[in-house]
């Protein structure tokens, strides 16, 4: 099923939601981030729905151990219903979308789903591509499904007052796509002097189109082509889990690692490396030595634990890593797990 993406100035009416559902839903279950209740426009909007489920956004929402309690409450709230009478509407950032998407995928073996992302990162990344996920302990996204939404509705008003850290998180994902795609997306990225909300909003359609191009080549991650979207994620997921960094910020740091390793391996020229590093540093991401000054080096034991549970792991000793020859030319290569760890030590992210 192809997902329709719409850009809106304000929250959608029920009629607009109905346009994104292939069946005539009798009930709309809105799963939403409780922090949105501070927004007067949202409070007025959510009051129009009979079935709502408030959650606390964050990785703890995706805890597999807590899921049975959530799903029991949800069934009690909306029953009776059939797979053709209920539509789940996810309103929130990435963790809410992952959780609500998984809920939609397993209720009656699947009910219609609409995403209304409220963070820029979710708007350009997690709301698209059909991945849902729960965490097992502190290991991210170990349980999940492929379940595309019928619609993704991107509402500008949600993004007007985002804190700087969320803007930087969005820019980490945008930079990832700019390096993967090259061309017009990279050109606009390097031409601007002001990476603000207006810039990100204007680039959203291009970023989403670029992501969907890779997803359509490999929707269920069978051929491996889609794995280029994991550029920056191998170390990024480690830093996210280890230090609790926002996803896009961790990915931005992971991009620095991937760029430096790509050059060290001889895949990327010094000129392309320097251009990429200049962009990433301007966006506020840190070189390894500066990152470690603010945090601390990774221990080899915990690094090994986090990376050994990565979904990109091929076997106990190898993983798929996304390198970059130059902007627009990413490629996936099988590397030894020990080589990855050794490179984090060489760059200074981890202790020897």
Image (cartoon, grey):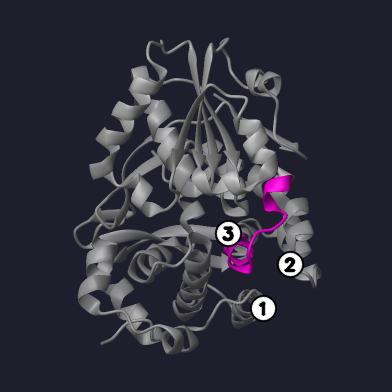
Q: Quadrant of the N terminus?
A: top right
Classify mark 1: helix, strand or loop. Answer: helix
Who is closer to the viewer here, 22 or 267?
Answer: 22
Q: Main secondary structure of the magenta part?
A: helix
- At 33% from the left and 28% from the top, the residue drawn is 73
Q: Earlier in the sequence, mark 2 or mark 3?
A: 3
| Residue 313 placement, left or right of 169 | left
- At 27% from the left and 64% from the top, the residue drawn is 306
319 in magenta: no
Q: Position of residue 2 (x, y in %)?
A: 58, 27
Q: Which residue is mark 1?
A: 282
Judge whether residue 127 can be spotted in this image: yes
Classify mark 3: helix, strand or loop. Answer: helix
Q: Position of residue 148 (x, y in %)?
A: 50, 31
Q: Position of residue 82 (x, y in %)?
A: 41, 10
| Residue 180 placement, left or right of 223 | right
Query: How far separated are the C-alphas under marks 2 and 3?
Result: 13 Å
Q: Quadrant of residue 347?
A: bottom left
Classify mark 2: helix, strand or loop. Answer: loop
Q: Which residue is mark 3?
A: 173
Q: Earlier in the sequence, mark 1 or mark 3?
A: 3
Q: Quadrant of residue 178?
A: bottom right
Q: Quadrant of residue 348?
A: bottom left
Q: Which mark is residue 195?
A: 2
Q: Which mark is residue 336?
A: none
Range covered by the magenta-colored residues = 157-170
């Amino acid at each position: 099923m192809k997902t329709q993406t719409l850009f809106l100035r304000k929250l959608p009416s029920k009629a607009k939601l109905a346009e994104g559902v292939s069946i005539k839903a009798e009930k709309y279950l809105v799963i939403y981030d409780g922090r949105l209740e501070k927004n007067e426009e949202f409070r007025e909007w959510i009051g129009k729905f009979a079935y709502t489920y408030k959650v606390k956004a964050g990785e703890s929402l995706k805890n597999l151990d807590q899921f049975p309690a959530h799903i029991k409450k949800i069934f009690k709230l909306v029953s009776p219903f059939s797979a053709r009478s209920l539509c789940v509407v996810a309103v929130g950032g990435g963790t809410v979308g992952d959780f609500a998407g998984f809920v939609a995928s397993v209720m009656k073996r699947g009910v219609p789903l609409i995403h209304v992302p409220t963070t820029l990162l979710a708007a350009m990344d997690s709301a698209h591509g059909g991945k849902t996920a729960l965490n097992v302990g502190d290991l991210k996204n170990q349980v999940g499904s492929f379940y595309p939404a019928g619609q993704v509705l991107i509402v500008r008003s949600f993004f007007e007052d985002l804190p700087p850290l969320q803007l930087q998180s969005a820019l980490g994902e945008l930079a990832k796509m700019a390096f993967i795609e090259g061309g017009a997306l990279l050109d606009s990225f390097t031409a601007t002097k002001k990476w603000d909300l207006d810039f990100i909003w204007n680039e959203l359609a291009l970023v989403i189109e670029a992501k969907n191009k890779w997803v359509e080549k490999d929707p269920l991650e069978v051929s491996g082509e889609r794995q280029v979207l994991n550029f920056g994620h191998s170390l990024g997921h480690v830093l996210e889990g280890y230090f609790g960094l926002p996803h896009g910020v961790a990915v931005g740091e992971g991009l620095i690692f991937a760029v430096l390793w790509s050059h060290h391996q001889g895949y990327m020229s010094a000129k392309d490396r320097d251009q990429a590093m200049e962009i990433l540093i301007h966006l506020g991401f840190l070189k390894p030595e500066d990152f470690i000054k603010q945090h601390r080096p990774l221990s080899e034991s915990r690094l090994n634990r986090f990376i050994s549970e990565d979904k990109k792991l091929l076997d106990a000793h190898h993983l798929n890593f996304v390198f970059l020859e130059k902007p627009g030319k990413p490629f996936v290569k099988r590397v030894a797990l020990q080589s990855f760890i050794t490179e984090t030590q060489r760059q200074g992210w981890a202790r020897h």
